[in-house]
Image: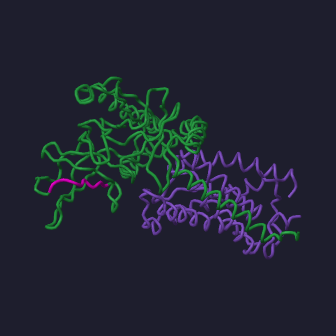
Chain colours: A purple, B green
């Protein structure tokens, strides 16, 4: 990846992450359905992972999660750990789904949202004095969060794609462990 | 040295971030409240607070509209009949209702601050009004952030009330212009509580089984406690140390009472009076110097 491309990705992710985190902690719960709110941070991380591959996805997930931890008063590293895994997983998953599948981003965002919420519950359950119960794993909020993520992903994924300077043409099919950057080169 | 293939490099990068996350988590839990990670977190939080206030300001009309729509849904039949002729009036009502709801909440708080209860029970305290600017939706913690901080006189462990003086939480962290309030339904919270009518006291904790319910423990099973009894802060010290809550702040009502032969204590469930998920204005009770 060229230096210009790295700088562009970093600046776009930094700006979008700040926006997503601020909106996540202030107004996301206003659109909650059955306890499930849209996970804007997850949408951003999955979008970046889809467009730039698992390594950049993991980095974006770590950075966005860390910012969310700091702003929301969570233990530093808690959301960073979860979103880092989600970013990496989304990048890996994206490379295993047919590139020309029109629903690929939405499938990845939906699965990423479910994985992020489950990860936050599981990690929270393991942390001391968290009070997080595993019953949250079978909450309907898991489904509604994913559905809202898909709905918001429809406009947000193309926006992230445009901001990162990717063409709207579907990416060439990637194989094996090659990341998106390698495939585009 | 052989070049690292992309799969190995990818795993290394992922591993580095995983280790960094786990290292941060470990460091965060091992250090004290004044440690570098906590200080860094407070700094970032302080930078984000003005943006959160702006986002809330922008979102407020939409929230008001949603509240109005929610209220209107209950009276759907009536609204259907009057919909067309009332269109213009409803737009006005929508705006006024939003203003009124907020004014109502503020009035409740102001009346509490001016009440005899405040003057008598909380004579040694100063009320600092604030607005909720952040309400994170995470399974980990139950906290809100308010727009008042150290510069306004807020300090850690100050009790926080809403409505007509209902207890909602305690200041857990404080920044220059903002403070994080741990709500009483946060898993780590324990409040010394009493049932004045029965001369009974115990420790109130969030119930692990049901949301919006608290368990009042350590109440002797030979005490008479009835459903509907009022629960307030006891102000008693406990095994956890000195109580930060002054005596007599309303918490809620007893909703169920049980006991068994083998237990020393009653099993009492309490419903809070404050709606912990929707209040927008609070008063932080800060102990006056020398009190």
* Left or right: where A91 falls relative to B193: right
Residue A35 against residue B109 in the figure, above or below: below
| In the image, residue B216 lies in the stretch drawn in magenta | yes
Residue B109: which quarter of the image? top left
Question: Start and end of the magenta stretch?
Answer: B213-220
- Find residue B31 and report its horizontal and vertical position in percent: 53, 48
> Can residue B87 be seen by looking at this rendering?
no
Residue B269: which quarter of the image? bottom left
Residue A127 against residue A107 in the figure, above or below: above
* Left or right: where B9 falls relative to A17: right
At x 83%, y 69%, the residue is: B4
Quadrant position of the C terminus of chain B in the picture: top left
> Can residue B196 be seen by looking at this rendering?
yes
* Left or right: where B1 falls relative to A177: right
- Find residue A38 and report its horizontal and vertical position in percent: 56, 56
Which residue is at the front of the view, B226 or B248? B248
């Amino acid at each position: 990846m060229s230096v210009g491309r790295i700088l562009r990705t970093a600046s776009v992710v930094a700006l979008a992450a700040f926006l997503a985190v601020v909106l996540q902690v202030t107004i996301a719960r206003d659109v909650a359905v059955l306890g499930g709110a849209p996970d804007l941070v997850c949408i951003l991380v999955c979008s970046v992972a889809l467009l730039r591959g698992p390594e950049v996805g993991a980095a974006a997930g770590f950075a966005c999660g860390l910012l969310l931890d700091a702003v929301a008063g969570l233990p530093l590293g808690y959301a960073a750990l979860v979103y880092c895994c989600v970013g990496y997983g989304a990048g890996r998953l994206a490379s295993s789904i047919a590139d020309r599948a029109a629903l690929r981003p939405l499938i990845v965002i939906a699965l990423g949202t479910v994985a992020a919420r489950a990860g936050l519950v599981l990690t929270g359950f393991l942390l001391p004095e968290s009070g997080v119960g595993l019953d949250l794993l079978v909450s309907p909020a898991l489904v509604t969060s994913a559905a809202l993520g898909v709905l918001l992903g429809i406009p947000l994924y193309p926006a992230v794609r445009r901001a990162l300077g990717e063409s709207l043409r579907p990416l060439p099919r990637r194989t094996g462990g090659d990341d998106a950057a390698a495939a585009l080169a | 040295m052989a070049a690292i293939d992309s799969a190995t490099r990818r795993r290394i990068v992922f591993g580095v971030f995983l280790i960094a996350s786990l290292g941060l988590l470990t460091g965060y839990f091992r250090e004290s409240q004044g440690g570098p990670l906590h200080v860094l977190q407070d700094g970032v939080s302080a930078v984000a607070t003005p943006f959160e206030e702006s986002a809330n300001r922008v979102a407020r009309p939409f929230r008001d509209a949603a509240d109005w729509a929610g209220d209107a849904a209950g009276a759907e039949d009536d609204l259907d009949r009057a919909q067309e002729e009332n269109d213009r009036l409803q737009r006005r009502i929508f705006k006024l209702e939003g203003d009124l709801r907020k004014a109502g909440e503020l009035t409740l708080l102001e009346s509490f601050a001016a009440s005899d209860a405040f003057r008598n029970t909380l004579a040694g305290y100063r009320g600092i009004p604030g607005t909720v600017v952040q309400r994170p939706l995470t399974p980990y913690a139950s906290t809100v952030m308010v727009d008042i901080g150290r510069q306004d006189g807020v300090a850690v462990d100050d009790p926080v009330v809403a409505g007509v003086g209902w207890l909602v939480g305690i200041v857990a962290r404080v920044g220059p212009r903002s403070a994080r309030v741990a709500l009483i339904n946060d898993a780590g919270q324990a409040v010394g509580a009493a049932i004045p009518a029965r001369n009974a006291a115990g420790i109130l904790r969030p119930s692990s089984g049901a949301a919006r319910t608290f368990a009042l423990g350590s109440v002797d099973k030979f005490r008479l406690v009835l459903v509907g009894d009022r629960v307030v802060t006891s102000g008693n010290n406990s095994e956890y140390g000195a109580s930060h809550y002054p005596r007599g702040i309303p918490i809620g009502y007893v909703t169920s009472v049980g006991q068994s032969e083998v237990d020393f204590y009653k099993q009492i469930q309490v419903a809070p009076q404050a709606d912990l998920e929707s209040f927008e204005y609070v008063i932080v009770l800060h102990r006056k110097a020398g009190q």
